[in-house]
Image: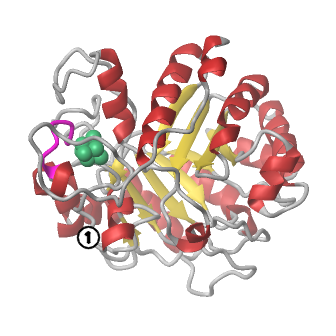
Amino acid sequence: MRPGHFDLDTAERPLVLIWELTQACALACDHCRADARPHRDPDELSTAEGKRLLEDAAEFGDGQLVVLSGGDPLVRDDVEELIGYGDELGLRMTITPSGTTSLTAERVQALADAGLKRMAVSLDGASPETHDAFRGEDGSFEETIRAVEDARNAGVPVQVNTTVCRETVGELPAIRELLREIGAVMWSVFFLVPVGRGRVLEPIDPDEADAVMAWLDEVSDAEPFGVKTTEAPHYRRVSMQRRTNGDDGGDNDGVRRRTGITAGDGFAFVSHTGEVYPSGFLPQSAGNVRETPVHELYRESSLFRALRDRDRLEGKCGACPYRHVCGGSRSRAFAHTGDPLASDPLCPYVPDGYDGPLPWDGSSGSTFEAEADLENA
Ligand code: SF4
């Protein structure tokens, strides 16, 4: 097993397999990765094709995590059937609905009865004003909080997903309080990758990203809920540096590893038409599940194998002693350069002795201020 991935061999199976059931959604959020649209694509995987995909996913091994996403997955009326089928196959079936009116208490109970193991909702602000403004939909905050209550009543654990960008970073301390109040089990913090409609949002700068990650590390120690990052594996580098006082040991043992995975290495994404991507933010396809089983594409395709080979990384990520526990966001590298093996421009770390090109134009100092919040933790 390669280092830095707990007890999971990510060359054999992903920690997270996402299936985008549909791109149809009633919302039109400013930052949508999927460029969601009101109507379903006639070329979506059918129920029968979806079941075959779940059978193939079960080949990864018992308890494989499957996230049903969208668009709004609840636009489809076979979601309960698919959850039930996946559950019978031994998969851990979870869902990320859009927080629209389709998420009624009855629907949440039906999902729970089918075997749903977790529901993830998006909160990008801690109040109706901030959340609704970010998503561009009045009433979205209240609907989301109601859905959380419905999930708790149905016995389904809730995860909160938050997008970190210039527009939301100031809300993080308040969202943290909200997670505690609503009894969420996990905070998944997504560091913006500028693709899809997300291109209209402004990313935070690299130094600020490091400050946010150090703060999240403190939050994870202090709170009952877990914290994980998406498209920000340098969270693990930040955590290790904090715990070793900046010692650049990289892969040194005895340091608590952080949950964090990168595109194609612990993570895979199946589109609504069956294309298999390393992540939903890295639009290079390894093949289609209509022709090749997903486990074969994940384990054998040259694209996924290249992304898992940390010695093929370029620039400062390739020279970095943390590349085996971090590796940088391959999706962000691709979005910036067209090369998924290039350096991640959101990371400010420069390895000792590295004098090659840097992937950013320059960064300002951190403006993320959560010290007062940390003192109250
Ligand atoms: S330089 Fe690359 S591999 Fe090293 S910590 Fe930063 S993102 Fe990770």
What is the x, y in percent for residue 222?
57, 14
- Left/right placement of residue 131 relative to residue 250 reads right
Residue for point 57% across, 79% down: 44
Q: Quadrant of residue 330?
A: bottom left
Q: Amino acid at mark 1?
A: Asp
* Image quarter of the C terminus: top right
Ligand 1 shows up in the quarter that is top left
Left or right position of 181 against 236: right
**Residue 144: image x %, image y %?**
81, 47
Q: Which residue is mark 1?
A: 339
Q: Residue 93 vs residue 60: left or right? A: right
Residue drawn 18% across the image and 27% down it: 248
Decide whether the magenta segment is chiefly helix, strand or loop: loop
- Residue 320: within the magenta? yes
Foreground of the two, 266 or 233: 233
The quarter holding residue 287 reads bottom left
Q: Nearer the viewer, residue 162 or 116?
A: 162
**Rendered view: 306 above or below 166:** below
Q: Which residues are magenta?
A: 318-323
Residue 345 visible in the displayed image: yes
